[in-house]
Amino acid sequence: MVSEERRPRLSGFMDSFNERRRSPRYKALKESLLAFRCASHEATEGDGVLLDLSKGGCRITSEVPLALSHYYRLVLQATAGYPITIETAVVCWRSKSMYGLKFITVGGDQEELLEQNLLQLRSVS
C-alpha cells in the first residue's frame, strides 16, 4: 500500500506524464479494427483491435507479435467512415499483446481523414 506521503508525488508524476502528450487520445469504438504489415519483414503482417487513437499515435491489441522499434504500415478502421492508412508507424512500447505506436508518416489526404475520425470519436466520448 502506498503511504499518504507518496500519493501527491505519484499524482504529480502522472500529471507530468499526461502533459507530455502532444494531442488528446480518444477511446476507439468497440468495432474498431486494423491491419498491419512490417516495413522490414514483409512476411510479418496481421490484424488487431484499435483501443484508442490520437493525431500522433494509437494503442492496439494483436495476437500477432509486433517488434519494438520496428516500422509498420497500418490501415485503421476507427469509425464507420473510410479506413485510414498510416504509411509509417513505430512500436514504442508493448505489454503482452498490447502495443503503443507512434505515427511517423501520414499522407496529406489521410491526415485529413484522421482528423475527421478523431472529431467523430471525440463527439461520442
Image (spheres, helix red, strand yellow):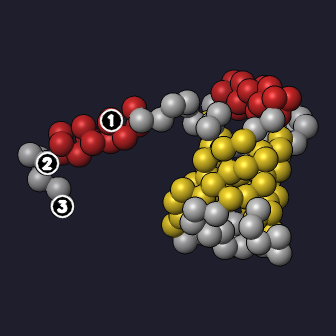
Q: How far across and how far down the image is residue 10, in percent?
A: 23, 46
Q: Residue drawn 55% across and 71% down?
A: 96
Query: Which numbered marker is on residue 15?
Result: 1
Q: Quadrant of residue 117?
A: top right
Q: N-terminal of the two: label 3 or label 1? A: 3
Q: Where residue 108 appears, x then y in whole percent?
A: 81, 29
Which circle, 3 or 1, is nearer the viewer? 1
Tag 2 near tag 3, CB within 8 Å: no
Q: From this viewpoint, is residue 120 visible?
A: no
Q: Nearer the viewer, mark 2 or mark 3?
A: 2
Which residue is located at x 57 percent, y 66 percent? 68
Q: Amino acid at mark 1?
A: Asp
* Amino acid tagged 2: Arg
Q: Nearer the viewer, residue 84 or 31?
A: 84
Q: Which residue is mark 2?
A: 6
Residue pictured at 66% horizontal, 73% vertical: 65
The residue indicated by pointer 3 is: 1
The image shows residue 77 at horizontal and vertical percentages of: 83, 46
Q: Residue extending furthest left?
A: 5
Contact between labelled residues 1 and 3, with CB atoms less than 8 Å apart: no
- The answer to which of 92 and 80 lies nearer the viewer is 92
Q: Is residue 16 left or right of residue 99?
A: left
- Give the class, few, some or many, for how many residues have Cα within 10 Å of label 1's Cα (few <14, many ≥20): few
Please provide percent x and percent y for residue 53. Answer: 65, 41
